[in-house]
């Protein structure tokens, strides 16, 4: 595949996205940026959230991970489904009833300023780390397969990607994202389907042959029954449920799109529709992964990094058309996670940290200028972290994303669950300490159990982290006479 041709396709696709941006951001103010004027059609949000949830990590890492972890990711997806139901029934009605722009203002009303700021700070930390891990994977692929051939260094590839994301989100915000996500989800799903088609064509398989080959690959085992394993099916299910609640229900990026729907009924329709489609789409990614395993075996290929399996096969072994389709799918998976992260972090910092909604003396113009500054600031931070990951990465990115979530979303999970499930008040000033101690204790427990009992918590660290936070809050509750 010619690097120049890949670059041209990348440029054409990016111009298409900018065209949609111009259309949706016309006369967009702060209300459009933060909540899309609460006019986003629920079906557009639901469909677009598929691309935002899957991201470049799912597009590349999940198929590649089948090589080492079979279909063990699927019980986690079943857990996602349970988590989405809880979000739709419990959390979303709460957010709509309180008419929130930032969901973390719930913590302020329930417990006080210190809990509120701690929760928002942990979201900003988690979303910044998780989003930049996702971006790093995509930038790496763009660098290896396109820009490196032109002598462009990695940091410059990262800078180009960040500038593009910055330019098409800084004005329209959520109003832009719900529409661009819909387009990008379509291209991403088409890329997966056509990749399967081209694998079948190259191997001389019919659809039935492909299904038989996938089944015979030895990689379709769904349930890991080794209780000591990090991928044990029950750990995966519980992890999936709580990861979903934390990374979607307690995540400003994902909830900001739902809050842009006109009412709670529309938002719940979005969530239920999205969750059902998500299960089917993830299964499709895993089938692609098993097909790639068979392809790699029969072609005598070997990969030390599983994240390189899908892009290498698509670009260098399946022909020019398949390579172009892969590139469009990759870009389509990359943009939704990047643009949503930048917008939600800007929203949370402006609302939660600066308190923009409470600045009654600020003009609309001043608020807009501050928002621009915050937006550019996070973009610069993204670039620094992407370059840093390039120097230290040593695991499949999908695993790193969930590990980061386990440590950083735990305090948020504890704060919200304690607030919703109990009527206790807490010593508000102690909550930042609890939020910092819980992940530290979680890390110590994980090391202890691994060393002495050979027991891996896996992504259930998130649950342990949340429980430690709840325990700390209960210990710091206010006694009533």
Image: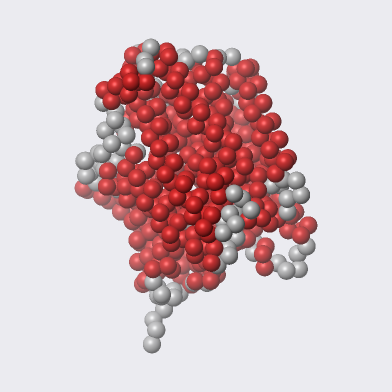
Q: In the rendered image, which quarter is residue 359 located in? A: bottom right
List x then y, in percent, for residue 45: 56, 47
Is 207 on the left-hand or right-hand side of 264? left
List x then y, in percent, for residue 411: 43, 59
List x then y, in percent, for residue 366: 77, 58
- Quadrant that contains the N terminus: top right
Q: Judge by depth and name the residue closer to the eye, 404 or 77.
A: 77
Is 255 on the left-hand or right-hand side of 357? left
List x then y, in percent, for residue 381: 60, 44
Is 194 on the left-hand or right-hand side of 8? left
Judge whether residue 124 can be spotted in this image: no
Seen as rendered, the residue at the extreme bottom is 481
Judge whether residue 18 can be spotted in this image: yes
What residue is at 47 percent from the left and 36 percent from the top?
Answer: 57
What residue is at 39 percent from the left and 84 percent from the top?
Answer: 480
Q: Which colour scheme is used?
A: secondary structure
Give the total of numbered labels.
Answer: 0
Q: Is residue 458 above or below residue 193?
A: below
- Quadrant that contains the C terminus: bottom left
Q: In the rendered image, which quarter is residue 183 located in? A: top right
What residue is at 26 percent from the left and 43 percent from the top?
Answer: 232
Is 155 on the left-hand or right-hand side of 221? right
Q: Is residue 54 above or below residue 292?
A: below
Q: Judge by depth and name the residue closer to the eye, 295 or 453.
A: 295
Q: Judge by depth and name the residue closer to the eye, 90 or 412.
A: 90
What residue is at 68 percent from the left and 53 percent from the top?
Answer: 32
Q: In the rendered image, which quarter is residue 21 located in? A: top right
């Amino acid at each position: 595949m010619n690097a120049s041709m890949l670059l041209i396709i990348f440029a054409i696709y990016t111009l298409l996205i900018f065209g949609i941006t111009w259309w949706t951001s016309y006369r967009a103010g702060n209300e459009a940026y933060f909540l899309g004027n609460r006019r986003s059609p629920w079906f557009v949000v639901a469909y677009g959230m598929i691309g935002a949830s899957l991201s470049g990590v799912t597009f590349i890492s999940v198929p590649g991970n089948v090589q080492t972890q079979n279909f063990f990711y699927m019980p986690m997806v079943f857990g996602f489904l349970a988590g989405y139901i809880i979000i739709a029934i419990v959390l979303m009605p709460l957010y709509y009833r309180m008419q929130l722009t930032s969901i973390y203002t719930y913590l302020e009303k329930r417990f006080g300023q210190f809990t509120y700021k701690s929760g928002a700070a942990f979201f900003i930390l988690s979303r910044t780390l998780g989003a930049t891990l996702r971006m790093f994977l995509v930038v790496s692929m763009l660098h290896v397969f396109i820009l490196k051939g032109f002598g462009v260094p990695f940091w410059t590839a990262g800078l180009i990607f960040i500038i593009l994301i910055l330019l098409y989100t800084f004005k329209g915000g959520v109003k832009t994202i719900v529409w661009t996500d819909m387009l990008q989800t379509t291209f991403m799903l088409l890329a997966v389907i056509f990749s399967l088609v081209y694998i079948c064509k190259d191997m001389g398989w019919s659809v039935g042959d492909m299904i038989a080959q996938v089944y015979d690959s030895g990689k379709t085992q769904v349930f890991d029954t080794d209780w000591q394993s990090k991928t044990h099916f029950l750990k995966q299910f519980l992890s999936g449920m709580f990861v979903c609640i934390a990374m979607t229900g307690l995540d400003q990026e994902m909830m900001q799109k739902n809050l842009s729907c006109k009412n709670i009924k529309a938002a719940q329709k979005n969530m239920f529709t999205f969750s059902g489609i998500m299960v089917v789409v993830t299964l499709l990614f895993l089938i692609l992964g098993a097909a790639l395993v068979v392809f790699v075996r029969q072609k005598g290929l070997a990969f030390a990094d599983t994240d390189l399996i899908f892009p290498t096969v698509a670009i260098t072994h399946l022909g020019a058309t398949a390579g172009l389709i892969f590139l469009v799918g990759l870009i389509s998976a990359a943009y939704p996670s990047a643009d949503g992260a930048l917008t939600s972090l800007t929203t949370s910092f402006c609302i939660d940290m600066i308190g923009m909604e409470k600045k009654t003396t600020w003009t609309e113009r001043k608020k807009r200028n501050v928002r621009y500054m915050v937006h550019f600031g996070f973009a610069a931070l993204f670039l620094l972290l992407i370059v840093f990951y390039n120097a230290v990465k040593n695991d499949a990115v999908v695993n790193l994303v969930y590990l980061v979530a386990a440590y950083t979303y735990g305090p948020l999970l504890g704060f919200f669950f304690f607030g919703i499930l109990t009527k206790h008040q807490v010593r508000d000033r102690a909550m930042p300490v609890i939020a910092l101690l819980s992940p530290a204790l979680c890390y110590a427990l994980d090391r202890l159990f691994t060393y002495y009992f050979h027991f891996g918590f896996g992504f259930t660290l998130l649950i342990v982290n949340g429980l430690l936070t709840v325990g700390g809050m209960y210990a710091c509750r206010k006694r009533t006479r």
